[in-house]
Image (cartoon, grey):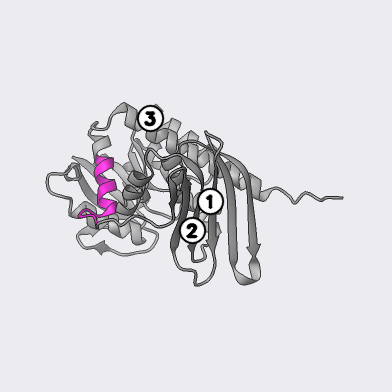
Amino acid sequence: MFGTVVVGVGIAGLARIRDLMNPMPSSPSEHLKLLGFVSRRSFGNINEAKQISLEDALRSKEIQAAFISTENRSHEETIRMFLEAGKHVLVEYPMALSAKAAHELWEMAEQKDKVLHVEHIELLTEEYKQLKKEVAGKDLVKGTLHFTGSVLDENKTGFPAFSGIARLTWLIDLFGDLTVTSATREKQKDKNYSRMTVHFQTANKKPLTWIEERGPGMRREKKINFCFTSGCLENFPQAPRSAVGLFMQDQNLFAKKLLGQVSKEELAAEKWRILRCLDLADVIQQHCEQPERICH
């Protein structure tokens, strides 16, 4: 059994507590035992889970793994503390708000022989699994992924290339390695509006565009337009509802890693994807933050 602690009790943290307390029968999650949760706010207990201090969680010999569900800005520091304390870590994406920090943390986990698992539930949705099947084996001509959503506090969530890394992960997972050709960002402070537009090239020199747009009252929505030599895909394929919740699927995957049930090849491919997306997010941020070139 692996004693676990949940750090942060927002929406994701509460889902983590729920799933740890009710693991799927006969699943790898049955090897995880929730020993408490950590929060800056004072709760006492949540269901049967008891609140413990961060210091106690780090010191406890009984806690072998931490689920980190805090705001993006504090992921890096929290991962570092738990790895230093010799614990395995599951963290919500993005694992850090710079590629440099992400590479350092990954190296640290490997040196300490600990599992560092980054949650990517967007790859586990039925909608995405169907889309991946639909795209498989087709030759891309060009494509666009356009996301809209409500306003985020960037001091907490980081630059949009990081807070929106779920979209970047989709593109890399669907179309392989990408190169950033250009990236710009439009901000209207008075309207609290932001639009980031990134242009990529695939390994076959095909253009892909990612738009991340946020403003007050904007509906959370993804639109796709992927054109292949065989025709265009403009709507998501119909997908059934999954019997297993996304956080539970992710928790099972983490438990499988702890139990040594995930192949070296799968782990290496996942590591490449996660770090590659963070490298690209860094490049995108640099492009967007370049001072405007003044043309004479």
Q: Looking at the image, do the residues carrying marks 3 and 2 touch, with CB atoms under 8 Å apart?
A: no
Q: Position of residue 210 (x, y in %)?
A: 53, 51
Closer to the camera in the image, 283 or 9: 283
Q: Position of residue 182 (x, y in %)?
A: 63, 45
Q: Looking at the image, do the residues carrying marks 1 and 2 touch, with CB atoms under 8 Å apart?
A: yes
Q: Which amino acid, by three-letter code, is at mark 2?
A: Phe
Q: Secondary structure at mark 3?
A: helix
To which quarter of the image does residue 236 belong? Answer: bottom left
Q: Is residue 10 above or below residue 229?
A: below
First in sequence, mark 3 or 1: give its number.
Answer: 1
Q: Residues within 10 Å of mark 2 (few under 14, many from 20)?
A: many
Mark 3 or 1: in front is 1
Numbered badge on residue 187: none
Residue 245 sits inside the magenta stretch:
yes
Closer to the camera in the image, 224 or 290: 224
Magenta stretch, residue numbers:
241-255
Kindly identify which residue carries mark 1: 210
Closer to the camera in the image, 23 or 184: 184
Q: Is residue 197 above or below residue 201?
A: below
Residue 80 can be seen, yes or no:
no
Q: CA distance from mark 3 to mark 1?
A: 26 Å
First in sequence, mark 3 or 2: give its number.
Answer: 2
Closer to the camera in the image, 46 or 233: 233
Kindly identify which residue carries mark 3: 268
Kindly identify which residue carries mark 2: 147
Q: CA distance from mark 1 to mark 2?
A: 8 Å
